Amino acid sequence: MTSYVNHRLHDDIRYFGGKDVDLCMNCGACTTTCPLSENAGGGFPRRVIRLIQTGQSDQLAANTDPWLCYYCGECSTHCPRQANPAETMMAARRYLTARYDWTGLGRWFYKSAWAEMAAIFAVGLLVAGLFIVWHGPVVLHRVALNTFAPVRAVEVGDWIMAGLLSFFLLSNAFRMVRWSLGEDLWRISAAVYLRQIPTFFLHLFTQKRWRQCGSPHGGLRWFKHLLLVSGYLSMLTLVLILLRWFQTDHIYPFYYPQRLWGYYAAVALLYPTVDFMISRWRKKEPIHRFSEASDWIFLIMLFLTALTGLLVNLVRINGWALATYVIYVVHLAIAVPMLVVEVPFGKWSHLLYRPLAIYLRGVQEAAAVERCAPALAPGATVSGS
Ligand code: SF4
Ligand code: SF4
């Protein structure tokens, strides 16, 4: 890779929240403290800080270290210069998210909370406007949600949105893969790529590295985050795959799977989001001392999505027809922009980038072993000897 110094990288990282990079004297104490550095090539997180200090923006874009950090804050606690390496890693993740995004929207949203809120507001207005113009008959003597918002039409809208978001997210992820593997991308055998796929799904669904993240509350934080992810995936499954089963006008007893799964998704989203907002507000833990507007917007949108989804259910089972239709539209006017803005361009994308980074690390290590295998085989001679 051609190496040139990007004099703006330092300012860029400051923009993304890494305000103390200058204080670092590269002593390496953070690397020895980090409970995850052992499996990450040794120089982590110091190496990322060094890349930023020396303006190596392309090397930083090709580096997956920031995704291997789970933000436990241990390194910041032990840094002798109060250089906040954990926050620098967070800023590097924001920078990478914006860098992978070829549309430039991610960068724009991270740098301007007003732009992000305006985008959310505009998409929300569009959703509400579509319902105002195209809603079905308004039945008031009973709740007829599927008459007001026919499930098949909503389902088609969901799939169109999912297709568009997948396109943006996967094309951004491909840039991450291309930059990380460089020219090896086409040289590594298909078998190596395929053998590492279970690693990707293991880390996507369990986030198990987080449990190694050393603070005394690491296990609890892992559990809350896992709960949040399970709520998120439940919501997506119910809305994208099982909507005809989930959005029904029949009032099933509360123990029926539709209702139980919906309640689980709501609680699994509400509890961690409220907890994370309180922690960010109190700023007691090192990891919650510094919050960017994008962190708050993500949490508030998730919280409102879950809350309005729960409210739709409550007014529906109580037979309040007009309230059901109004809150349903409000719910979608919050949920859709949250997905549209956060999935491909914002904080949500880390759900894909983290396991992908671990997958890529596994691919690189397996490919290195494969390359060395002939030289290590019994009877092999060292070239030139
Ligand atoms: S961030 Fe702190 S602990 Fe890490 S290398 Fe810099 S000065 Fe040392
Ligand atoms: S925040 Fe935790 S996981 Fe991340 S670099 Fe620091 S010590 Fe390592």
Image: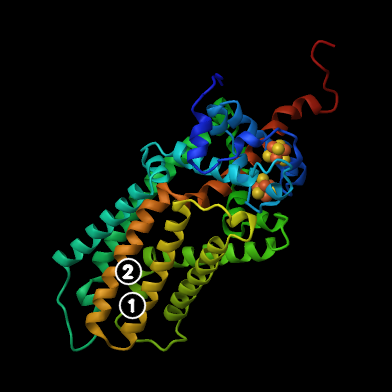
Q: Residue at x 29, y 82 (%)?
A: 249
The residue to which callout 1 is attached is: 312
Residue 48 position in % (x across, y down) = 63, 35
Q: Secondary structure at mark 1?
A: helix
Q: Is residue 256 left or right of residue 229?
A: left
Q: Secondary structure at mark 2?
A: helix
Q: From what the image shows, is residue 212 above or below residue 147?
A: above
The amino acid type of the residue labelled 1 equals Val
The residue carrying pointer 1 sits among few (fewer than 14), some (14 to 19) or many (20 or more) residues within 10 Å by Cα, namely many
Q: Is residue 371 left or right of residue 15?
A: right
Contact (CB < 8 A) between labels 1 and 2? yes
Disc number for residue 331: 2
Disc number for residue 328: none
The amino acid type of the residue labelled 2 equals His
Name the image quarter holding residue 184. Answer: top right
- The reply to whether residue 287 is in sight is yes
Q: Nearer the viewer, residue 272 or 149?
A: 272
Q: Residue at x 48, y 63 (%)?
A: 233
- The reply to whether residue 41 is in sight is no
Q: Is residue 285 left or right of residue 110?
A: right
Name the image quarter holding residue 300. Answer: bottom left
Residue 94 position in % (x across, y down) = 50, 43
Inter-mark Cα distance, 1 to 2? 8 Å
Q: Nearer the viewer, residue 128 or 143?
A: 128
